[in-house]
Image (cartoon, rainbow, N blue to C red):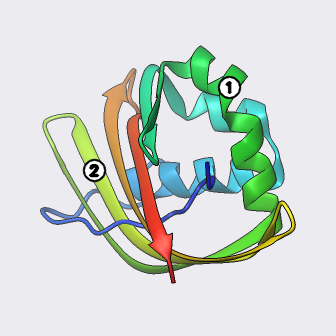
Amino acid sequence: MFGVLRCLFIVGVTAASGRNSPESVLDRFQEAVRSGDREQAMSLLSRDVVIFEEGEAEMGLEEYATTHLGADIEFAKSTSTRIMDTRSGAVNGAAWVLRRSETTGTFGGKKVMRIGAETAVLRREKGRWRIVHLHWSGHVK
């Protein structure tokens, strides 16, 4: 319902840095959504991605692309997000990125002031990190 909130807190071993690090992949996904680049956003998600948000779930890339990605793009274009904390880790071809953030702006004629939490789980697929799970939640500030 409230788009990409970009908030997480992560524990564990720090994942590798660079353009294809788990954090970088999540950053690129979020930038693609913010800029409305559906193709780029989808290229960073695994085909079997599962996205949980505000009690709803999209159970795969095609379902997300056809049901919720457009709303996430519109929300992200209408708001600004400040990442407050990021933690990440990786082990044996799996990685996680946890963030907490603050999102402000106006969406659907209503003022937005939310504190959010985001959990991203990534998996190595053909030498690249792909997002296999996103979980977004938040509360009014």
- Furthest residue toward right: 109
Which residue is located at x 50 percent, y 52 percent? 26
Q: Amino acid at mark 1?
A: Thr
In front here: 13 or 104? 104
Q: Position of residue 94 (x, y in %)?
A: 22, 38
Q: Amino acid at mark 2?
A: Trp
2 left or right of 88? right
Q: Is residue 100 above or below residue 58?
A: below
- Using a 10 Å C-alpha cutoff, classify the residue at mark 1 as few (fewer than 14 neighbours), some (14 to 19) or many (20 or more): few
- Is residue 124 at all visible to an observer of this figure? yes
- Give the labeled residue for mark 1: 67
Which quarter of the picture shows residue 80? bottom right
Q: Position of residue 112 (x, y in %)?
A: 69, 75
Quick one: SS at disc 2?
A: strand
Quick one: SS at disc 1?
A: helix
Q: Is residue 2 above or below residue 38?
A: below
- Using a 10 Å C-alpha cutoff, classify the residue at mark 2 as few (fewer than 14 neighbours), some (14 to 19) or many (20 or more): many
Q: Position of residue 89 (x, y in %)?
A: 21, 57
Q: Residue 96 shows which numbered tag? A: 2
95 left or right of 56? left
Which residue is located at x 38 percent, y 28 percent? 127
Which residue is located at x 44 percent, y 53 percent? 136
Mark 2 → mark 1, Cα distance in angstroms: 25 Å
Query: Is tag 2's residue or tag 1's residue first in the polypeptide sequence?
Result: 1
Count the marks: how many?
A: 2
64 left or right of 26? right
Q: Please identify, in this view, whether the residue under mark 2 or under mark 1 is nearer the observer.
A: 1
